[in-house]
Image (cartoon, rainbow, N blue to C red):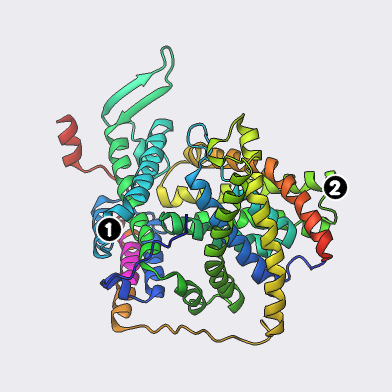
Amino acid sequence: MNNNSTWQFGTREVVYGAIGAALYGALSWVTNFFPLPAAGNITFRPAVAVLIFFGVAYGPIVGLLAGFIGNTLGDMISGFGFYWNWSLGNGLMGMVPGLIMASITDFKARSQIIKAVGWGALGIAVGMLFASLTEMFTGGIDLSTALVGYFTPAFLGNLVVTAILLPILMIAFAGVAARRGR
Amino acid sequence: MLVTWKYRPRNTFIQRLDPRTRFILLACTIFALTIPDIWDYRILVPLFLFSLTQFLMARIEWKDIRRPLFFISFLVFFIVGLNGLLSGRGGPSTVDDPNSPILFQALIPGTTWGLTVTVSKLWFAMNQVIRILSMALPAILIPYTLDPNIYGTAFKRMGTSDKVSFTMDLAFRFLPTFARDLTITMDAQRARGYEIDKLKGGLIARIRRLAPLAIPVTMQSTVTGEEVIDAMDLRAFGTAPRTWLKELHYAPRDYAVIGVGIAIFITCCVLKWGFGIGGFFVPDFFTKALVG
């Protein structure tokens, strides 16, 4: 299920990048109708777990494309516009966990699930930090506002969702992949 | 519940522009404000009016734009307010002018910590709102005025590879399918007693209960993906440069608009680096209006 070289960009990456993006956009859209309760400006986006799963399962290129295009799609169908820095931040959020694709050989193994969640957390930190810090140049906000107003809520919300849903996605994927034999 | 694009064909000047022109103009506006770091109201206000003109020219119906506009306005005011409360910094250092008259001050007793609103900080916050909106207004327009079928072609013609452009094209085609799959799955789970709109329990339990919705659709999509890969491989996808059904051609109006965008960017750079105009300052009329 996981025998591609990490940075290969072929038909497989094109298709799963597109599927990941469409799922990310569609799930973001659906959960807009049923928002989870949150404190302050923290929002929980279950779609983030799916994005990180695509990174872990199919590699950094798929994660990058799914995050960048998926965020653009989600913002489009919600009517929020096009914000290149948040789309790129979401792309990084999918790309970083994709770096361990080659080392994930058993999606059911506890140690590998923990590793995936850890890299997912790193991806969330990198992606959201990038998007938040670029707001300093575009919005003229200071570092503390970027960290408190943008980064912390986004990081915490995405981390909670990933820690809960990513293991479930990985275990389910192990079953599907075993049945298909690829 | 069907996914609907925000795009509607409208006979407007904005929608007659080539999609590449729209992206280039947006980039020029963002770069013009951020690269030379413009904070002078004499430049910000005309640029804001330019963005507002584009927004009004797009003739988007109020009922369509109301919700995102409210959301973005809330976010802008929240962040600008938070910035003021935390420090009032972030822009040029002159915002923290210690000689600026104090309008409001609330300090923690016995400390120098607290909220201090000066004329300089208030003017900076107003400039910040205008600056952010100058960049956000043309960005908000894009989903409403760009045909979703043209994104892949537009990015291809702007220099991205066939594969990246095709990924974008494919994602736009998959989206309604997956949105439909999600609603079908939701209905099927509801028939089994699953209530997504009445999720009970703590936060973790609520997030976990989204699994019956997200997992089946995600797993089904991975299976669908294998079939699509086989179909594309059988058609030799990626073995040679591909052609694109939709053709894009610049019209004279596109050259004119791109020219305006580049002129804005160059003017901002020349004013800032050549003449030292464009930095932050508080105009006398504002100070006089507030403190006499």
Residue at image position (28%, 51%) is B40
- Provide the residue span drawn in magenta: B261-271
Residue B274 location, quadrant: bottom left
Residue B180 to residue B251: above or below: above
Tag 1 subunit: B
Q: Nearer the viewer, residue A125 or A24?
A: A24
User: What SS does tag 1 mark?
Assistant: loop
Using a 10 Å C-alpha cutoff, classify the residue at mark 2 as few (fewer than 14 neighbours), some (14 to 19) or many (20 or more).
some
Describe the element under mark 2 as helix, strand or loop. loop
- The image shows residue B191 at horizontal and vertical percentages of 60, 46
Quarter holding the C terminus of chain B is: top left
Q: Name the residue carrying label 2.
A: A109
Q: Position of residue B210 (x, y in %)?
A: 62, 43
Residue type at tag 1: Glu
Q: Is residue B274 above or below residue B16?
A: above
**Residue wearing tag 1:** B61
State which chain disc 2 sits on.
Answer: A
The one nearer the camera, B224 or B68, is B224
- B260 drawn magenta: no
Residue A59 pos. (x, y %): 72, 62
Q: In the displayed structure, does residue A113 sit left or right of residue B217?
A: right
Name the residue rendered at 52%, 34% in the picture: A38
Residue located farthest toward the top when viewing the structure as drawn: B110
Q: Position of residue B17 (x, y in %)?
A: 33, 75
